[in-house]
Amino acid sequence: MDVNDLKTLYATVDKRMNSLLEHTQQELSGVRTGRASVAILDSVHVEAYGATVPLNQVASLSIPEPMLIAAQPFDPSLTDLIEKAVQAANLGLNPSNDGKMIRIPIPPLTDDRRRELSRVVHKLTEESRNGVRQVRRDANDQLKKLLKDKDISEDERRRALEHIQKLTDDHVKKIDDLQKKKDDELLNR
């Protein structure tokens, strides 16, 4: 095995860990912090034109006020369907519609709800950290196999293990930072 094979392994590990990090960022953006953000509507899908489509493909979303999201349907005939989809998404939001636009007020969070959302954040980030550790385990198993097959030396394996551990530590720290930032938004209003 040559250096390029190890570089390929490192690149694969880094790519998988970055993918987990991006997924975590996306999941955390959906956890509402009491301020209006169109990201909290990412999970809302509307039955339109015989298919289920994301809300942002059938309406223009904007934040005219800090505690309000406005959804302007591209097709006014979808107004009622969009309103029902937001209600059905179980986000604790109660939209109102004037026939042309849907206004979605963001209710303030109670202290209990903030703590509950903080637990959700901790669960999501722990799952992500476990995913990063699984990627590390997979890479370490590959290195063990390469050593057993005599494709790499013990020294190369040790250096590779250190490099993979460094990648793991870097990604876990980034996940920890995401968790801390989201917790601050939730608990330290």
Image (cartoon, rainbow, N blue to C red):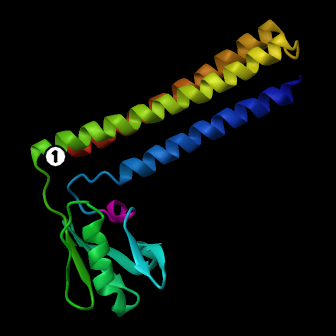
Tell me: 58 left or right of 149: left
Magenta segment: 37-42
- Residue 144 lies, in percent from the top left, at 74, 15
- When the figure is inspected, residue 129 is found, relative to residue 111, above or below; the finding is above
- Residue 54 lies, in percent from the top left, at 44, 71
Name the residue at 35% across, 54% down: 30
Name the residue at 48% across, 82% down: 50
- When the figure is inspected, residue 186 is found, relative to residue 105, above or below; the finding is above
Residue 188 seen by the camera:
no
- Residue 78 lies, in percent from the top left, at 35, 87
Tell me: 31 left or right of 105: right
Magenta stretch: residue 40 in it? yes
Residue 117 seen by the camera:
yes
The residue closer to the viewer here, 181 or 85, is: 85
Name the residue at 11% across, 43% down: 111
Residue 175 image-quadrant placement: top left
Q: Which residue is mark 1?
A: 113
Name the residue at 82% across, 11% down: 148
